[in-house]
Image (tube, helix red, strand yellow):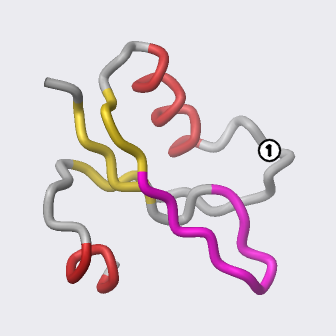
């Protein structure tokens, strides 16, 4: 989050989610997918880290419009 706050100034929402890439029932992932399908997002920035952490640990979301 510190990197996001220091380097990405124009974001409205952060959706966090950590888990296996095989599990598509993650709450944050489903929210992000729903917003994408509803055309509510103009930009997605993901932070993927090593060490076994996969998925969307930090995803700032900027609604369209």
Residue drawn 50% across and 59% down?
Answer: 46
Residue drawn 57% across and 41% down?
Answer: 29
Decide: is 4 above or below 36: below
Where's residue 14, x and y in %? Answer: 32, 55
| Residue 63 placement: quadrant | top left
Find out whether residue 20 is within the magenta segment: no
Magenta region: which residues?
45-55
Left or right: 65, with 3 as reference point: left
* Residue positioned most to the right: 22
Q: Secondary structure of the magenta portion, mostly?
A: loop
Q: Which residue is mark 1?
A: 23
Decide: is 50 above or below 58: below
Left or right: 38, with 23 as reference point: left
Quadrant including the C terminus: top left
Residue drawn 52% across and 68% down?
Answer: 47
Where's residue 41, x and y in %? Answer: 33, 30
Quadrant including the N terminus: bottom left
Where's residue 44, x and y in %? Answer: 41, 46
Left or right: 63, with 46 as reference point: left
Find out whether residue 53 is within the magenta segment: yes
Badge 1 local density, few (<14 within 10 Å), some, or many (20+)? few
């Amino acid at each position: 989050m510190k990197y996001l706050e220091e380097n990405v100034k124009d974001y409205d929402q952060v959706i966090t989610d950590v888990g296996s890439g095989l599990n598509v029932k993650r709450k944050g992932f489903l929210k992000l997918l729903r917003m994408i399908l509803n055309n509510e997002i103009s930009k997605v920035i993901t932070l993927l880290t090593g060490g076994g952490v996969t998925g969307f640990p930090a995803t700032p979301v900027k609604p369209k419009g």
